[in-house]
Image: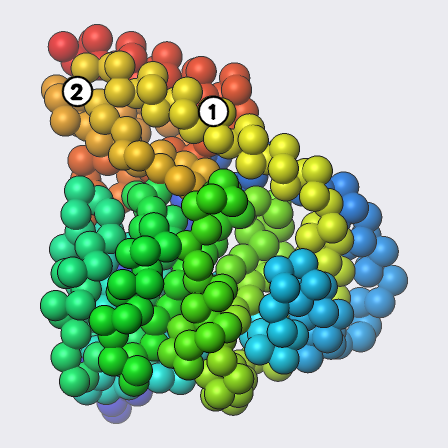
Amino acid sequence: MTAPAPKPWILGIAPYVPGRATSEDGRKVVKLSSNENPFGTPEPARAAYRAAADHLERYPDAAAVDLRAALAAHYGVEAERLIYGTGSDEVLHLAAGTFAGPGDEIIHVRYGFAVYEIATRRVGATPVIVADRDYATDVDAILAAVTERTKVVFVANPNNPTGTYATAAEIARLHAGLPASVLLVLDQAYTEYLDPEDDDGGLELARTASNVLVTRTFSKIFGLASERVGWGYAAPEIIAAMHRIRAPFAFSIGAQAAAIAALGDHGFVARSREHNRAWRQWFSDQVDAIPGLRAVPSKANFVLVLFEGLLTAEDGYKALMAAGYATRWLPGQGLPQALRITIGSESEMRDVVAVLRAEVERAG
């Protein structure tokens, strides 16, 4: 008998590999591999989540009315132009599934978020992967790759896993160069780590243009990675189409309550941003001072460390794991020469630098 055969484009997907939280022998390690907030979760969000435990027998509000109202008030957007999902990952999948299919093309940069290619192949579309400019988004390369079959362009800003950033002028130039029929998806998972003057103008573009979708998440600065709350903002027609294939109950009662409470804890967000800014700079400076290592300039809550000397990224990864630190080595994303390292606490960052320095000296 013949078993059911998966579609060939499904078999072409390389499954997403999450950051490790344990060593090869099962030891629990400090997790600097998934860009989580080292301060944990805001206490008001924890309290709201606990309170929601009294209502676990109820389905969550499928329209997420309270969450959309909170987002609208916080970001100055229209609630009716918001969509929500299981993390911003689901919103990215919804974008691909709504606007592309077999015979279509979706563009993303070479060192982009792994979900872009998965979302593309999942719907039978063809991924078009363009070159970077020293690990950063190259607007000219994206525009040169556009064809009549292009339906979606994915751009993360700041970019994951490189941490690089495209300015508002670059994003505006990219949008201006795209046909109106192409959806520009601006993945802003790390945008809350930016200084105000670094705003890339994505929300305003999505407000005024008919072909821009901005996606965001509560998994990073808001400290709610386990609750998988993401959202997107776009023109009403874009949102209405995506709602047709959205799962009706994307996240739990507790997740919605925690997300609303997290939005209101401005002090937690400010403290997280300030800590990240200071220790990201310190860490980058320290890495650049170690022979054979280079830090890619980052605007996110992680730094991509390039290994350009005798010490390889793989050996650096193993040494850090042996010392109790899980980082992200990404040979599967074309980065065998690099580690992506989340900005953790002060003591964690000092330890990571000490391990890297010792390993470089040993290799030399």
Q: Residue 41 vs residue 197: left or right? A: right
Using the numbered discs, state the Cα–Cα distance from disc 1 to disc 2 in whole angstroms: 21 Å
Query: What residue is pinned by disc 1?
Result: 279
x and y percentages locating residue 317 in the rendered image: 30, 29
Q: Residue at x 29, y 56 (%)?
A: 170
Q: From this viewpoint, is residue 94 visible?
A: yes
Q: Is residue 217 above or below residue 145?
A: above
Q: Amino acid at mark 2?
A: Gly
How packed mark 2 is, by other alpha carbons closer than 10 Å (few <14, some 14-19, many 20 or more), is some
Question: Looking at this view, is 104 or 321 the one in front?
Answer: 104
Q: In which quadrant is the C terminus drawn?
A: top left
Q: Residue at x 34, y 71 (%)?
A: 184
The residue that mark 2 highlights is 292
Secondary structure type for disc 1: helix
- Look at the image and tell me in which quarter the N terminus lies: bottom left
Residue drawn at (56%, 31%) of the image: 274
Label 1 vs label 2, nearer the camera: 1
> Circle 2 — which element?
loop
Front in this rendered view, residue 218 or 329: 218
- Give the class, few, some or many, for how many residues have Cα within 10 Å of label 1's Cα (few <14, many ≥20): some
Q: Position of residue 67 (x, y in %)?
A: 70, 67
Front residue of 98 and 33: 98
